Image (spheres, rainbow, N blue to C red):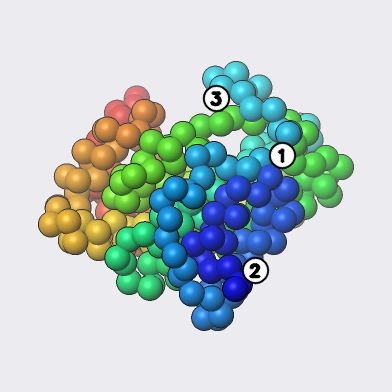
Amino acid sequence: MAKQLFECAIDVVNEPDLVKKTDLAMDTARKWLKRQMGKGRYDEQSLPEKPGRPEKPELLPPGQMPKRNLRSVEGRKAHIHALAHIELGAVDLTWDLVARGCGHNLPRSFLDNWVQVGLEEAKHFRLLATRLEELDTFYGAYPAHDGLWQSCAETAHDLLARLAIIPLVLEARGLDITPVMIERTEAVGDLATAKILHTIYNDEKRHVAFGAKWFRYQCDVEHKQPVPTFQALVRQHFRGALKPPFNDKARAAAGLTPSFYKPIASIIG
Ligand SMILES: [Fe+2]
Ligand SMILES: [Fe+2]
Protein backbone atom coordinates (compact mmCIF):
# COMPACT_ATOMS: atom_id res chain seq x y z
CA MET A 1 0.00 0.00 0.00
CA ALA A 2 1.20 3.52 -0.77
CA LYS A 3 2.63 5.41 2.18
CA GLN A 4 0.35 7.78 4.07
CA LEU A 5 1.02 11.20 5.60
CA PHE A 6 2.48 10.03 8.92
CA GLU A 7 5.09 7.80 7.28
CA CYS A 8 5.90 10.30 4.54
CA ALA A 9 6.41 13.12 7.08
CA ILE A 10 8.89 10.91 8.95
CA ASP A 11 10.64 10.01 5.70
CA VAL A 12 11.10 13.74 4.96
CA VAL A 13 12.76 14.31 8.34
CA ASN A 14 14.96 11.20 8.07
CA GLU A 15 16.13 11.76 4.48
CA PRO A 16 19.79 12.96 4.39
CA ASP A 17 19.88 13.83 0.67
CA LEU A 18 18.52 17.38 0.42
CA VAL A 19 17.21 17.10 -3.14
CA LYS A 20 15.31 13.96 -2.17
CA LYS A 21 14.20 15.51 1.14
CA THR A 22 12.69 18.59 -0.52
CA ASP A 23 11.24 16.53 -3.40
CA LEU A 24 9.55 14.25 -0.93
CA ALA A 25 8.23 17.22 1.09
CA MET A 26 6.72 18.80 -2.02
CA ASP A 27 5.32 15.55 -3.38
CA THR A 28 3.76 14.59 -0.03
CA ALA A 29 2.21 18.04 0.35
CA ARG A 30 0.68 17.92 -3.12
CA LYS A 31 -0.80 14.49 -2.55
CA TRP A 32 -2.16 15.35 0.89
CA LEU A 33 -3.66 18.66 -0.23
CA LYS A 34 -5.28 16.97 -3.24
CA ARG A 35 -6.73 14.36 -0.87
CA GLN A 36 -4.75 11.60 -2.54
CA MET A 37 -3.40 10.23 0.73
CA GLY A 38 -4.75 9.54 4.20
CA LYS A 39 -3.30 10.30 7.60
CA GLY A 40 -1.96 6.81 8.16
CA ARG A 41 -1.32 4.97 11.38
CA TYR A 42 0.45 6.94 14.10
CA ASP A 43 3.33 5.16 15.77
CA GLU A 44 5.20 7.03 18.49
CA GLN A 45 8.21 4.68 18.19
CA SER A 46 9.02 5.76 14.66
CA LEU A 47 9.24 9.51 15.38
CA PRO A 48 12.74 10.71 14.46
CA GLU A 49 15.21 11.75 17.15
CA LYS A 50 17.38 13.70 14.74
CA PRO A 51 16.87 14.78 11.13
CA GLY A 52 18.82 13.18 8.33
CA ARG A 53 21.47 15.60 7.01
CA PRO A 54 24.35 15.42 4.55
CA GLU A 55 27.95 15.36 5.85
CA LYS A 56 28.36 19.06 5.14
CA PRO A 57 27.92 21.75 6.41
CA GLU A 58 30.10 21.39 9.45
CA LEU A 59 28.04 22.27 12.53
CA LEU A 60 29.45 24.73 15.06
CA PRO A 61 28.07 26.07 18.36
CA PRO A 62 26.20 29.36 17.61
CA GLY A 63 28.87 31.49 19.41
CA GLN A 64 31.64 30.21 17.10
CA MET A 65 30.02 31.26 13.84
CA PRO A 66 32.22 33.63 11.80
CA LYS A 67 31.00 37.23 11.48
CA ARG A 68 29.53 38.30 8.14
CA ASN A 69 29.65 41.58 6.30
CA LEU A 70 26.83 42.05 3.81
CA ARG A 71 28.83 44.54 1.77
CA SER A 72 31.34 41.92 0.60
CA VAL A 73 30.29 39.22 -1.87
CA GLU A 74 31.86 36.60 0.41
CA GLY A 75 29.86 37.92 3.39
CA ARG A 76 26.66 37.83 1.36
CA LYS A 77 27.22 34.25 0.31
CA ALA A 78 27.79 33.25 3.94
CA HIS A 79 24.61 35.12 4.90
CA ILE A 80 22.49 33.38 2.24
CA HIS A 81 24.04 30.11 3.40
CA ALA A 82 22.96 30.84 6.98
CA LEU A 83 19.41 31.58 5.78
CA ALA A 84 19.32 28.37 3.75
CA HIS A 85 20.38 26.49 6.86
CA ILE A 86 17.52 28.05 8.86
CA GLU A 87 15.02 27.10 6.14
CA LEU A 88 16.33 23.55 6.11
CA GLY A 89 15.82 23.45 9.87
CA ALA A 90 12.27 24.70 9.29
CA VAL A 91 11.64 21.87 6.80
CA ASP A 92 12.56 19.25 9.40
CA LEU A 93 10.74 21.00 12.25
CA THR A 94 7.55 21.39 10.26
CA TRP A 95 7.41 17.81 9.02
CA ASP A 96 8.16 16.64 12.55
CA LEU A 97 5.15 18.71 13.69
CA VAL A 98 3.01 17.16 10.92
CA ALA A 99 4.03 13.66 12.04
CA ARG A 100 3.30 14.47 15.69
CA GLY A 101 0.04 16.19 14.72
CA CYS A 102 -1.12 12.86 13.23
CA GLY A 103 -1.15 11.49 16.77
CA HIS A 104 -3.46 14.18 18.16
CA ASN A 105 -7.18 14.43 17.81
CA LEU A 106 -7.08 17.64 15.78
CA PRO A 107 -9.19 18.94 12.88
CA ARG A 108 -7.92 17.99 9.45
CA SER A 109 -7.24 21.67 8.76
CA PHE A 110 -4.42 21.54 11.34
CA LEU A 111 -2.59 19.07 9.10
CA ASP A 112 -3.57 21.01 5.95
CA ASN A 113 -2.01 24.18 7.37
CA TRP A 114 1.25 22.59 8.52
CA VAL A 115 1.62 20.50 5.37
CA GLN A 116 1.36 23.75 3.42
CA VAL A 117 4.01 25.27 5.66
CA GLY A 118 6.18 22.18 5.09
CA LEU A 119 5.84 22.66 1.35
CA GLU A 120 6.80 26.35 1.61
CA GLU A 121 9.82 25.69 3.83
CA ALA A 122 11.11 23.20 1.23
CA LYS A 123 10.55 25.86 -1.43
CA HIS A 124 12.43 28.47 0.64
CA PHE A 125 15.40 26.16 1.10
CA ARG A 126 15.51 25.43 -2.62
CA LEU A 127 15.30 29.08 -3.62
CA LEU A 128 18.24 29.92 -1.39
CA ALA A 129 20.27 26.82 -2.35
CA THR A 130 19.76 27.71 -6.02
CA ARG A 131 20.81 31.30 -5.32
CA LEU A 132 24.02 30.01 -3.71
CA GLU A 133 24.74 28.06 -6.90
CA GLU A 134 24.17 31.17 -9.00
CA LEU A 135 26.84 32.79 -6.83
CA ASP A 136 29.23 29.87 -7.52
CA THR A 137 28.90 28.24 -4.16
CA PHE A 138 26.59 25.65 -2.61
CA TYR A 139 24.76 24.70 0.56
CA GLY A 140 27.38 22.91 2.68
CA ALA A 141 30.25 25.23 1.74
CA TYR A 142 30.14 27.23 5.00
CA PRO A 143 29.82 26.13 8.62
CA ALA A 144 26.36 26.32 10.19
CA HIS A 145 24.95 26.07 13.70
CA ASP A 146 22.82 23.43 15.27
CA GLY A 147 20.44 25.41 17.47
CA LEU A 148 17.07 24.85 15.76
CA TRP A 149 16.63 21.14 16.26
CA GLN A 150 17.36 21.61 19.96
CA SER A 151 14.15 23.65 20.22
CA CYS A 152 12.46 20.80 18.45
CA ALA A 153 13.74 18.14 20.82
CA GLU A 154 12.96 20.32 23.83
CA THR A 155 9.31 20.79 22.86
CA ALA A 156 8.80 17.40 21.21
CA HIS A 157 6.16 16.09 23.60
CA ASP A 158 4.10 19.21 24.13
CA LEU A 159 2.08 20.62 21.25
CA LEU A 160 1.48 23.98 22.96
CA ALA A 161 5.19 24.40 23.71
CA ARG A 162 6.10 23.53 20.13
CA LEU A 163 3.64 26.10 18.75
CA ALA A 164 4.77 28.73 21.25
CA ILE A 165 8.47 28.38 20.43
CA ILE A 166 8.63 27.60 16.73
CA PRO A 167 6.02 29.76 14.96
CA LEU A 168 5.37 32.31 17.71
CA VAL A 169 8.94 33.00 18.84
CA LEU A 170 11.32 31.91 16.08
CA GLU A 171 9.23 32.52 12.97
CA ALA A 172 7.83 35.74 14.48
CA ARG A 173 11.46 36.86 14.89
CA GLY A 174 11.79 36.33 11.15
CA LEU A 175 9.00 38.88 10.63
CA ASP A 176 10.99 41.41 12.70
CA ILE A 177 14.28 41.03 10.85
CA THR A 178 13.40 40.13 7.26
CA PRO A 179 12.18 43.60 6.14
CA VAL A 180 15.50 45.08 7.35
CA MET A 181 17.38 42.31 5.56
CA ILE A 182 15.47 43.01 2.35
CA GLU A 183 16.35 46.70 2.55
CA ARG A 184 20.05 45.97 3.09
CA THR A 185 20.14 43.41 0.32
CA GLU A 186 18.51 45.84 -2.09
CA ALA A 187 20.90 48.59 -0.97
CA VAL A 188 23.91 46.50 -2.05
CA GLY A 189 22.20 45.81 -5.39
CA ASP A 190 21.51 42.08 -4.89
CA LEU A 191 17.97 42.21 -6.24
CA ALA A 192 17.74 38.48 -6.98
CA THR A 193 18.30 37.63 -3.31
CA ALA A 194 15.97 40.43 -2.20
CA LYS A 195 13.21 38.93 -4.35
CA ILE A 196 13.62 35.55 -2.62
CA LEU A 197 13.49 37.27 0.77
CA HIS A 198 10.22 38.96 -0.23
CA THR A 199 8.71 35.57 -1.06
CA ILE A 200 9.92 34.14 2.24
CA TYR A 201 8.58 37.13 4.20
CA ASN A 202 5.12 36.84 2.69
CA ASP A 203 4.94 33.10 3.37
CA GLU A 204 6.27 33.47 6.90
CA LYS A 205 3.48 35.90 7.82
CA ARG A 206 1.10 33.05 7.15
CA HIS A 207 3.20 30.59 9.17
CA VAL A 208 3.00 32.85 12.22
CA ALA A 209 -0.75 33.23 11.64
CA PHE A 210 -1.18 29.44 11.58
CA GLY A 211 0.89 29.28 14.77
CA ALA A 212 -1.29 31.87 16.52
CA LYS A 213 -4.51 30.22 15.34
CA TRP A 214 -3.57 26.71 16.45
CA PHE A 215 -1.98 27.91 19.69
CA ARG A 216 -5.29 29.54 20.64
CA TYR A 217 -7.23 26.49 19.50
CA GLN A 218 -5.13 24.11 21.62
CA CYS A 219 -5.31 26.44 24.65
CA ASP A 220 -9.07 26.28 24.31
CA VAL A 221 -8.97 22.46 24.17
CA GLU A 222 -6.79 22.37 27.30
CA HIS A 223 -8.86 25.11 29.06
CA LYS A 224 -5.88 27.46 29.30
CA GLN A 225 -5.56 31.21 28.83
CA PRO A 226 -3.43 31.90 25.71
CA VAL A 227 -1.40 34.90 26.94
CA PRO A 228 -0.14 33.62 30.33
CA THR A 229 0.31 30.12 28.87
CA PHE A 230 2.47 31.49 26.06
CA GLN A 231 4.58 33.50 28.49
CA ALA A 232 5.10 30.55 30.84
CA LEU A 233 6.12 28.27 27.94
CA VAL A 234 8.58 30.81 26.55
CA ARG A 235 10.18 31.24 29.98
CA GLN A 236 10.43 27.49 30.36
CA HIS A 237 11.65 26.50 26.89
CA PHE A 238 13.33 29.45 25.23
CA ARG A 239 16.83 30.30 26.40
CA GLY A 240 17.38 33.48 24.40
CA ALA A 241 15.70 36.82 24.97
CA LEU A 242 12.74 38.21 23.01
CA LYS A 243 14.51 41.22 21.60
CA PRO A 244 12.96 44.39 20.24
CA PRO A 245 12.50 46.04 17.82
CA PHE A 246 9.39 44.03 17.00
CA ASN A 247 7.44 44.25 13.76
CA ASP A 248 4.24 44.89 15.72
CA LYS A 249 2.17 45.45 12.60
CA ALA A 250 3.05 42.17 10.89
CA ARG A 251 2.86 40.27 14.17
CA ALA A 252 -0.59 41.67 14.98
CA ALA A 253 -1.82 40.97 11.44
CA ALA A 254 -0.85 37.34 12.07
CA GLY A 255 -2.81 37.34 15.34
CA LEU A 256 0.21 37.70 17.60
CA THR A 257 -0.72 40.83 19.52
CA PRO A 258 1.78 42.71 21.75
CA SER A 259 0.12 41.44 24.96
CA PHE A 260 1.76 38.06 24.20
CA TYR A 261 5.36 39.15 23.86
CA LYS A 262 5.82 42.71 25.17
CA PRO A 263 5.64 41.82 28.88
CA ILE A 264 8.40 39.21 28.49
CA ALA A 265 10.62 41.15 26.06
CA SER A 266 14.09 42.13 27.15
CA ILE A 267 14.49 45.87 27.67
CA ILE A 268 17.20 47.29 25.48
CA GLY A 269 18.72 50.75 25.49
FE1 LIG B 1 10.72 29.57 5.68
FE1 LIG C 1 8.18 29.35 8.19
The earlier-in-sequence mark between 1 and 2 is: 2
Residue 189, x across and y down, in percent: 74, 47
* Residue found at x 60% / y 55%: 11
* Residue found at x 18% / y 61%: 220
Please name the amino acid that badge 3 sits on: Pro
Neighbor class of circle 3 (other Cα within 10 Å; few <14, some 14-19, many 20+) is: few
Depth check, front residue: 35 or 226: 35
The earlier-in-sequence mark between 1 and 3 is: 1
Query: Relative to 175, is 239 on the left or the right?
Result: left
The single residue placed furthest to the front in the displayed view is: 1
Q: Secondary structure at mark 3?
A: helix
Tell me the distance, in whole angstroms, between the alpha carbons under discs 1 and 3: 19 Å
Q: Secondary structure at mark 2?
A: helix
Residue under numbered circle 1: 54
Please name the amino acid that badge 2 sits on: Asp
Q: Is residue 55 above or below residue 19?
A: above
- The image quadrant that residue 140 belongs to is top right
The earlier-in-sequence mark between 2 and 3 is: 2
Depth check, front residue: 75 or 154: 154
Residue under numbered circle 2: 27
Q: Which image quarter is the N terminus in? A: bottom right
Residue 62 disc label: 3
Q: Is residue 168 visible?
A: no
* Residue found at x 74% / y 41%: 139
Please name the amino acid that badge 1 sits on: Pro
- The image quadrant that residue 72 belongs to is top right
Q: Is residue 169 above or below residue 118?
A: above
Q: Secondary structure at mark 1?
A: loop
